[in-house]
Amino acid sequence: MNRLYKMHFPMVLHLVGQNSGSEAEAKDVYQEAFLVLYENLQKPDFELSCKIKTYLYSVSRRLWLKRLTRKKGQADIQDFEEFLPFEDSAAAVTENEFRFQAMDVALGKLGEPCRTILEDYYLNDFSMVQIADKMGYTNADNAKTQKYKCLNRLKKIAEGIKNVDQ
Amino acid sequence: MLTNNTNTERIEQYLEGKLQGAELTSFEQELQQNPALAQEMAEFQLLLTDLRHYGQRKQMKALLDGFHQNLDQREVEVGLARYRTNFRLLRRKYFPTIAAAASVALITVFGTLFTLDYVRSLEKTSQTNYRSLLRKIQLNQNKLNNLENSLDTAVLNSIAINRDQYLKGGGTGFAVSADGYLLTSYHVVKKSDSIFIESTVRPDQRYKVELIFGDEEADLALLRVNDKKFTTFGKIPYMLKQDLADLGEDIFTLAYPREDAVYGEGSVSARSGFEGDKAAYQVSIPVNPGNSGSPVFDAAGNVVGIIKGKQLESEGVAFALKSPAMLAMIGKLPPDTLKVPLNLPRTNRLAGQKRVAQLKKIQDFVFQVKVY
């Protein structure tokens, strides 16, 4: 994967660079495209209908076009590779990024110790006993109660964010 | 909407399959009768998917950031330059820049050419003392074959002779990956229409190979088998040494100066090659035309170099490109050159063995390179 990453970065750097973007923006776009590819590859019904290079280029192109439009109001990209015109999947692409951002903000607002508890339990697969131990709760049940409180709060915050954005 | 902990807890236990017996049935019943609970469960599931998705993405992002930090700035520049050259010329905007760059380039090119020419004229005298060990097939030999052929076509119509009619020369090459990559000297394959490798140890192994990459200055070429009947070389018993060999170290080689593998031994006589060439060793191995491209092993069976040439007026003075220089060239290959990743051998399975046993293993991976 590292090789793959290395191989096509210059292409996207060039694409973004040629169309008034910085290297940091190129990195963002490229990583996002890479994530899309990675997430899609994990779906059982996904079929890669072109070369990986073309796929990465097309997604990056789409993403950059979107960002440019947001920045300047209108945008036009100079192309140097063939690409697939992803109109529909682009929506899903931004949707994924949006969900990620929303969760990031929500977890930020949630604050400690809730964030750590939830991340440890749901993302790092810690047991309640381990968490109680780590966070200094007297027993696993106390930690569990705390966890549910946190979860409910997170839910409310997440709903709040989604409503504001819509 | 007011949610309480117990509800959430029950939902989670239900989803994790921890609810059992009476609790399970009552929960399922409630789920059917109470749409609010069902809705709550759906929301809970959504939240968890979001959370997990967030976790995966974050992990992946960290991984990608890692890759990004590992990016070799120079490699990126090289990659970028490839796109720029394709594209920039189309853009009027850059015309003044291009014009300026072009004039600088022109001056540099001609400047270099003149200087090189001058240096070359100085070097010419010494060049004649050096000889690369390409095996040249003499014209007479071919004519003889022709004659024989026409005299007695019926009897002498063996494929071998027909084949060799077009033989231009040859050298030696050795495998560096199980899936078909080989190294040899660039001058061996430089002027080739087609290249074949042969082994006298395993006569079934005669394959067509293609030139993947050649470096004239280092005199090193990377070949790859391009033959339908090829599957694998098998596991390679030696590896390319990353460090330099020591002065006086015992070394040996296996090569094809004629139609059979020939063993030669000697030692590292100097840390530099012909006229102070830092990328090569001087070695005291008897070499002949056809030795070009043969691997030089140290006592433990690591490849420390590749034979490239010898000095004419003195005996026992040959030169071998150093293994770190070989590794450097392989490392610098443009990313798209390799169709299949080149996995160099990472283990040496020859250390500590007797020379005869080492050679028995090595001989399967050293080939005669025939150039047509």
Image: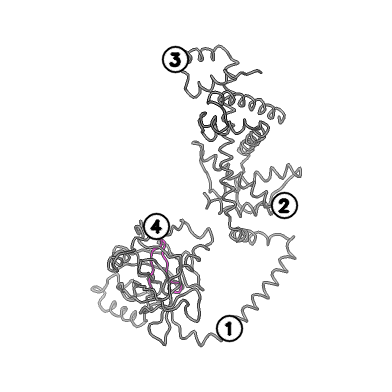
Amino acid on which the number 4 mark rests in the picture: Asp
Image depth: mark 3 or mark 1 in front: 3
Residue B236 appears left or right of B13: left
Amino acid on which the number 3 mark rests in the picture: Gly
Residue under pointer 4: B179
Percent coordinates x, y for residue B47 in the rendering:
59, 28
- Could you tell which of marks 4 and 3 lies nearer the N-terminus? 3
Name the secondary structure under disc 2: loop
Q: Are marks 4 and 3 in contact (CB under 8 Å)?
A: no
Image depth: mark 4 or mark 3 in front: 3
Spatial distance from mark 3 to mark 1, Cα to Cα? 93 Å
Q: Residue at x 53, y 35 (%)?
A: A124
Return the residue found at the far right: A73
- Could you tell which of marks 1 and 4 lies nearer the N-terminus? 1
Amino acid on which the number 2 mark rests in the picture: Ser
Percent coordinates x, y for residue B130 in the rendering:
45, 83
Residue under pointer 3: B21
Q: Which residues are magenta?
A: B171-187
Name the secondary structure under disc 1: helix
Residue under pointer 2: A20
Q: Do dots 3 and 1 share one subunit?
A: yes
- Could you tell which of marks 3 and 1 lies nearer the N-terminus? 3
Residue under pointer 1: B119
Spatial distance from mark 2 to mark 1, Cα to Cα? 46 Å
Q: Do dots 2 and 1 share one subunit?
A: no
